[in-house]
Amino acid sequence: MAVKPKLDSRFPDVPAYIIDADQVRDDRGGASLELRAASIRGLSHRFYGSARQDAYARMLSEDGRYLVACVADGVAAGEYSHLAAEIVTRDGCRNLVEQLSAVTPEKLDWLMMLGKLVSRTVSAAHDIARRNGGDPPGTDPREAGRYLASTALFAVIDLEPGANGEHTAHVVALGDTSAWLLNPGDAVPWTPLQHVKNSDSEVASSTTAAIPVVPAVAPETVVVRFGPGTALVLMTDGVGDALGSGGGEVGAFLARAWATPPTSLNFAAQVDFARRSYDDDRTALALWPVPSP
């Protein structure tokens, strides 16, 4: 049954979808990566008239050596979680770009960056409470999380490939946003870079870690290398849940569709694939290395 989209009158400035396509060039001006990204309001949000809560951002380091990318999924329980996703993607990428002006990706202070995002999110919760005449949240970040919260997935990609043509990416995740390496030529084309959600659970759970509540120690940094003929894909659980372990119909469909960079509109349509019961917002950002001439 077709869903007639309803607008969210509370947040009229939040677009239902964002589509992005670019060829990212290295610091010498040579083509390095093909980028496609799309953030699509899910069927449930269209039906109930609520705003898209996913977001993504991407920025270049000041020297043009690194691409910083982030996708984030606002937690549905927070009415203003779309703001949390925007804070995480925008401010998180900016902080990493600032750090990269002084250090290499191996020395990035991820925990410091997450702490700044916590402070920014808690401050936003106080502003929301003040505007609405409510009691401001206390010092416990979990109280701020009732207003807005978001998962986070960051990737810092070296635009200068190694001698074998491979790019190095440093990936850090908080929550159920996920990064995958796509190798369309493999029998199992999808390789997860984090634990696959609910893969070891008999009962599926929607509970996830999210800013403004972060662990006391930095999340694990995953270092991955990918070259021409492969792709690095960052996605929220609106895509990831349907992808599962990558071995089913959705995995086969996306592996075929993303074997090479599609047009921006085709990529958005593919992110918005139809699958019964998967009605969450969907966001994906994919990177394909450009072969050397």
Image (spheres, rainbow, N blue to C red):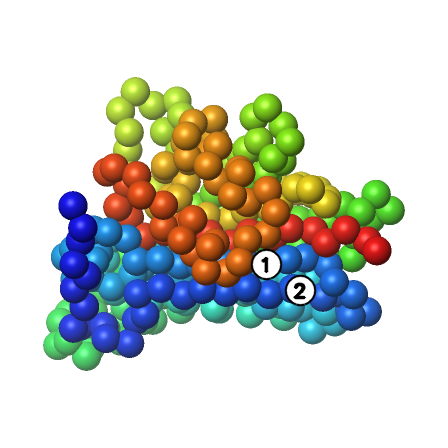
Q: Quadrant of the N terminus?
A: top left
Q: On the picture, is 126 further left or further right than 135?
A: right
Where residue 25 appears, x then y in whole percent?
72, 66
| Disc 1 crowd, CA 10 A, few/some/many (<14, 14-19, 20+) | many
Where residue 128 appears, x then y in whole percent?
23, 73
Tell me the element at label 2: strand
Residue 204 drawn above or below residue 179:
above
Where residue 169 appears, x then y in whole percent?
66, 49
Dot placed on the residue nearer the N-terminal end, 2 or 1: 2
Along the viewing direction, whichever of 190 and 131 lies nearer the viewer? 190
Where residue 276 appears, x then y in whole percent?
25, 37
* Quadrant assignment, res 145: bottom left
Tell me the element at label 1: strand
Question: Of all residues shown, which one is farthest toward the right?
Answer: 163
Question: Cβ–Cβ below 8 Å for labels 2 and 1?
Answer: yes
* Residue under the point 65% across and 64% down: 23
Along the viewing direction, whichever of 240 and 22 lies nearer the viewer? 22
Report the residue marked by disc 1: 35
Q: On the picture, is 21 further left or further right than 274?
A: right
Residue 39 drawn above or below residue 275:
below
Report the residue marked by disc 2: 24
| Cα–Cα gap, marks 2 and 1 | 7 Å
Asked whether residue 68 appears in the rendered view, the answer is yes
* Residue under the point 23% across and 72% down: 11
* Residue under the point 17% across and 72% down: 10
* Residue under the point 69% across and 62% down: 66
Q: On the picture, is 64 further left or further right than 222?
A: right
Query: Three-letter amino acid code at disc 1?
Result: Leu
Query: Three-letter amino acid code at disc 2?
Result: Val
Question: Of all residues shown, which one is farthest toward the bottom?
Answer: 131
| Disc 2 crowd, CA 10 A, few/some/many (<14, 14-19, 20+) | many
Residue 191 drawn above or below residue 105:
above
